[in-house]
Amino acid sequence: MKTIIQTADAPAPIGPYNQAVLVNNTLYASGQIALDPKTMTLVNDNIIAETKQVMKNIAAVLDAATMNFDNVVKTTIYLSNMNDFVAVNEEYSRFFNDKTAPARETVEVAGLPKSVNVEISVVAVL
């Protein structure tokens, strides 16, 4: 059974997709960018602020599915510039326990929605 997860505490989708889909005990969360869910404006003063907003958005989606970062088993980080890796990794790491952190890949891409610098998606399990 497929359950659509939606919350006003994360940005509304900007295309034909949902914030997340729960199938059995697995949550597939769409990539989040640094949109403020209240104003739908970008938080992109710097890469750290941008990453922090992305992670807050992910937290809201996880919460809507009655999960948290401990439930995350896989993440994908998309960067527009791999030179931002260290700063993004530093902020990202604040949300996970090193001993139980999820599997992950980080890739540099030619472009991201709304010309942001970082997008992160997660898979989580109950």
Image (cartoon, rainbow, N blue to C red):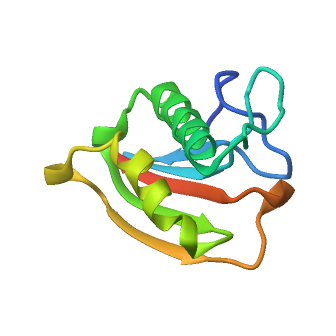
Q: Nearer the viewer, residue 63 or 44?
A: 44
Q: Quadrant of residue 86?
A: bottom left
Q: Nearer the viewer, residue 59 or 112?
A: 112
Residue drawn 54% across the image and 32% down it? 56
Q: Nearer the viewer, residue 96 or 31?
A: 96
x then y, percent, for residue 34: 69, 42
Residue 70 as seen in the image, left or right of residue 27? left
The quarter of the rendered structure image containing the C terminus is: top left
x then y, percent, for residue 111: 78, 72
| Residue 93, placed above or below residue 85 | above
Residue drawn 83% across the image and 23% down it? 39
Residue drawn 60% across the image and 67% down it? 78
x then y, percent, for residue 72: 35, 48
Q: Is residue 94 visible?
A: yes
Residue 72 as seen in the image, left or right of residue 86? left
Q: Nearer the viewer, residue 80 or 101?
A: 80
| Residue 71, placed above or below residue 107 | above
x then y, percent, for residue 25: 37, 45
| Residue 126, placed above or below residue 109 | above
Instruction: Report the number of numbered marks.
Output: 0
Q: Quadrant of residue 35?
A: top right
